[in-house]
């Protein structure tokens, strides 16, 4: 897994914090510690998933497309994954078909790891972007610029 999920979550939490105020890709990139082009690409992906909307023109930027309480981390995860991830890279291995153990290894591991993948999905589905924003608020120092809102 790459950093797309973490950066996308950062973007959405920032937008939740900003409320109805559009946020530019430059501001989002500065906060996430990445390049504005990376943010613009992710914003495009999040827009296609219906999680954000863009407002053009002076004072434009990105806003949440729906309430932060209605966006789960599973929504974010699914939006930024290009395909269903092979989290444990089981299907990236090439066991020998000439070995009895090798012929059944991938199928066996897929069956054993399936519950872990389902648990991860359930955990992500149980957390909203609003909850991420609330948790961030607990860690912001008092008087931190942007700490209110």
Image (cartoon, helix red, strand yellow):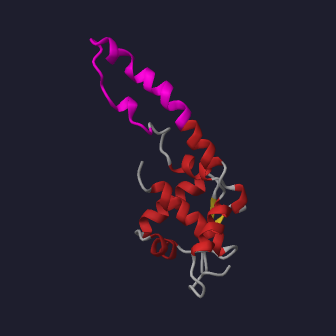
Q: Nearer the viewer, residue 49 or 144?
A: 144
Q: Nearer the viewer, residue 98 or 84?
A: 98
The percent position of residue 59, horizontal first and vertical second, equals 61, 80
The percent position of residue 109, horizontal first and vertical second, equals 43, 26
- The count of marks equals 0
The residue under the point 40% across, 23% down is 106
Is residue 120 one of those drawn in magenta? no
The quarter of the image holding the C terminus is: bottom right
The residue under the point 55% across, 60% down is 9
The residue under the point 27% across, 18% down is 96
**Magenta residue span:** 87-116
The percent position of residue 23, horizontal first and vertical second, equals 58, 74
Is residue 89 one of those drawn in magenta? yes
Q: Quadrant of residue 88?
A: top left
Figure check: 134 above or below 98: below
Report the residue that reaches farthest toward the bottom: 143
Figure check: 126 above or below 140: above
> What secondary structure is the magenta-colored segment mainly?
helix
Is residue 18 in sight in this rendering?
yes
Is residue 66 in sight in this rendering?
no
The residue under the point 38% across, 35% down is 89
The percent position of residue 118, horizontal first and vertical second, equals 58, 36
């Amino acid at each position: 897994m790459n950093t797309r999920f973490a950066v996308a979550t950062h973007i959405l939490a920032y937008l939740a914090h900003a409320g109805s105020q559009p946020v530019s890709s430059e501001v989002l990139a500065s906060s996430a510690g990445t390049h504005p082009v990376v943010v613009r690409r992710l914003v495009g992906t999040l827009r296609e998933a219906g999680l954000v909307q863009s407002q053009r023109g002076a004072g434009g930027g990105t806003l949440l497309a729906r309430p932060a309480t209605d966006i789960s981390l599973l929504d974010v995860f699914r939006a930024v994954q290009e395909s269903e991830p092979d989290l444990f890279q089981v299907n990236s291995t090439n066991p020998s078909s000439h070995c009895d153990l090798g012929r059944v290894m991938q199928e066996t591991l897929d069956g054993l790891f399936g519950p872990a993948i389902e648990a991860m999905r359930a955990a992500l589905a149980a957390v909203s972007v609003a909850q991420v924003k609330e948790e961030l608020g607990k860690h912001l120092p008092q008087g931190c610029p942007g700490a209110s809102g």
